[in-house]
Image: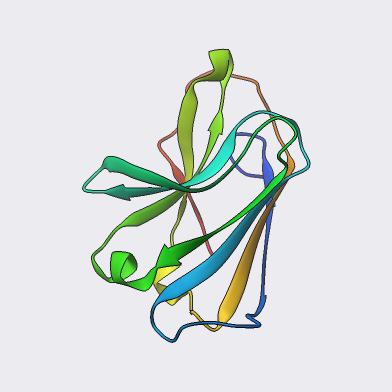
């Protein structure tokens, strides 16, 4: 799917080989598009909390965990990337994060990227799982 900023992100899910019921959700971020910073970030009350996973340079893949308790508390999870001048920018909110299950493994593959900054960008778009 082509997203508003010109990116393509493929989301896949499969049964997790191991999991802790109602504790964490395993996620992976892979970036074959370029070597700029990409991340899944966590936010509470519109404030950055942490990077769940991140790629940059030669590190093209990273795995991490989203805590179910953080989802239940209303935290938001966003696909972010470095844009012009390397500024870290939140772009795509994972809208259906509350539907993610600990029994599944979720992979976010950034397959195409656009670094253009022409015009103004809307606020973060939403990605459905």
* For residue 14, side relative to residue 21 (left or right): right
Front residue of 115 and 37? 37
| Position of 5 relative to 15 (above/below) | above
Q: Nearer the viewer, residue 40 or 60?
A: 60
In the picture, residue 106 is in which quadrant?
Answer: bottom right
Residue at 75% over, 32% down: 34
Q: Is 50 left, or right, of 75 in this rendering?
A: right
Determine whether, in the image, residue 67 is placed left or right of residue 5: left
Q: To which quarter of the image does residue 32 belong?
A: top right
Q: Is residue 129 visible?
A: no
Does residue 6 sit above or below 16 in this rendering? above
Residues 121 and 39: in front is 39
Q: Residue furthest bottom?
A: 21
Relative to 44, is 92 on the left or the right?
A: right
Q: Is residue 68 visible?
A: yes
Residue 52, position as x, y percentages in the image = 47, 51
Screen quadrant of the C terminus: bottom right
Residue 100 pos. (x, y %): 48, 74
- Tell me what residue is drawn at x 66 percent, y 83 percent: 17
Q: Is residue 106 above or below residue 81?
A: below
- Classify residue 55 by image quadrant: top right
Q: How is the image coloured?
A: rainbow
Q: Please give the name of the residue rendered at 30% of the width and 58% of the height, measured from the top-left corner.
A: 75
Q: How many marks?
A: 0
């Amino acid at each position: 799917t082509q997203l508003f900023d010109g990116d393509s992100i493929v989301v896949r899910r499969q049964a997790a080989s191991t999991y802790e019921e109602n504790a964490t959700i395993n996620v992976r971020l892979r970036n074959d598009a370029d070597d700029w910073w990409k991340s899944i970030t966590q936010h509470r009350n519109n404030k950055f909390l942490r990077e769940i996973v991140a790629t940059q340079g030669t590190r093209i893949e990273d795995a991490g965990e989203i805590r179910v308790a953080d989802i239940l508390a209303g935290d938001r999870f966003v696909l972010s990337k470095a844009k012009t001048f390397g500024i870290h920018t939140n772009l795509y909110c994972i809208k259906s994060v509350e539907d993610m299950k600990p029994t599944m493994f979720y992979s976010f593959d950034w397959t195409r990227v656009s670094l253009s900054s022409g015009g103004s960008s809307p606020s973060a778009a939403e990605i459905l799982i």
